[in-house]
Amino acid sequence: MPASSLAQHLAGHVQHLLGSGSFPQPGGWTHMGAVICDVSFQPWCNYERTLRPRLLHLQLSWPDTRTVRGFQRRLATEDLALAMKFNHAQKVATAHAITDLLAAHGVDARDDVHTWLGHQTHRAALCTVKGVGPKSIDYIGNVVGRSHVAVDVHLRAFAVDAGVPNLPYDQLRAVHEEAAALLGHDKGGPEHAVWRHRAEAA
C-alpha cells in the first residue's frame, strides 16, 4: 500500500479515536538536567508513575543543573543514580555520555539544543552514544520545544491498529508526519496525543 494511503488510514484512526484536535505540543523541560535524564532514563519505563516524579525532584534538588555545564559539574562529584533514585548503570552512563557530548560541542541551554538539533551532522553525533538512536534524538527534540515524531511502542501499536504495517523507523515516522499534515496539525501535536492515549490505556 502506498505511503499516502497508509497516512490516510492513520489519520482516519486518529480522528475516529481522538477527534480532530486541537492537539497541543508536549511542554518539555527548560532544565537541561531534566532534558538529559528524560531521554536517558525513559526507554522501557512507565513515564507518569516512575520517571516524571523523579525528573521533577531532580529539578528541585539540583537547581544549579539548568545548563549542560552545570549538570556536568554535578555529575563529576555526585551519583546520578542516587539523585534519580533509579539504579540502572546503562541509563546513567547514557546520561553522562550525552552530557559530555553536548558540552564538547558548546551546547549549554535548551535553546542551544533546539538550534543544534537542526543539523544532521549533530544528530549523527548523538547516535554515536550508546543507548541513543533515531527515536531518542527525535524525543530530545520534543522535550526542548521542537516538533518531531518519536516513534515508540505506543505509536507503533496505534499504527498497527490503524492497519499500518510494522515499518522501519524512518518510514513509520514519515507516515505519522503525513497523517498529522492531513489532519491540519503540526506533527508533534498528534504524536503526543497518540502517545498519551496509548500510555493511559496500557
Image: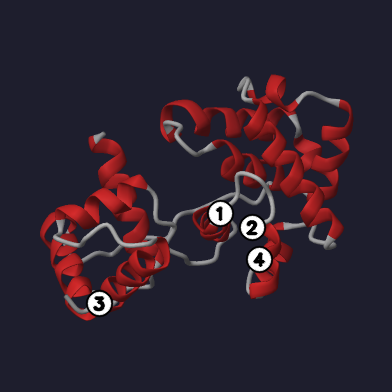
Element under disc 4? helix
| Residue denoted by label 3 | 3
| Residue denoted by label 2 | 127
Q: What separation in Å lies between label 3 and label 4 (alpha carbons)?
A: 26 Å
Q: Amino acid at mark 1?
A: Gly
Q: Earlier in the sequence, mark 3 or mark 1?
A: 3
Q: Quadrant of the N terminus?
A: bottom left
Q: Earlier in the sequence, mark 3 or mark 2?
A: 3
Q: Residue at x 78, y 54 (%)?
A: 101
Q: Residue at x 69, y 55 (%)?
A: 128
Q: Which quadrant would residue 146 be assigned to in this image? A: bottom right
Q: Residue at x 13, y 67 (%)?
A: 12
Contact (CB < 8 A) between labels 2 and 4? yes
| Residue denoted by label 1 | 133
| Residue denoted by label 4 | 124
Q: Earlier in the sequence, mark 1 or mark 4?
A: 4
**Total residue callouts:** 4
Left or right of 105 on screen, residue 20: left
Task: Judge the density around disc 4: few (<14), some (14-19), many (≥20) Cα neighbours within 10 Å.
Answer: some
Q: Amino acid at mark 3?
A: Ala
* Residue 194 appears anywhere in the view: yes
Contact (CB < 8 A) between labels 1 and 4? no
Left or right of 44 on screen, residue 164: left
Q: Which quadrant would residue 105 be assigned to in this image? A: bottom right
Question: How does the figure colour the protein chain or chains?
Answer: secondary structure
Q: Locate residue 187, reporting x and y percent.
A: 38, 69
Q: What separation in Å lies between label 1 and label 4 (alpha carbons)?
A: 9 Å
Q: Quadrant of the C terminus?
A: top left
Q: Can you name the residue that lies furthest to the left here? A: 16
Q: What separation in Å lies between label 3 and label 2 (alpha carbons)?
A: 26 Å
Contact (CB < 8 A) between labels 2 and 1? yes
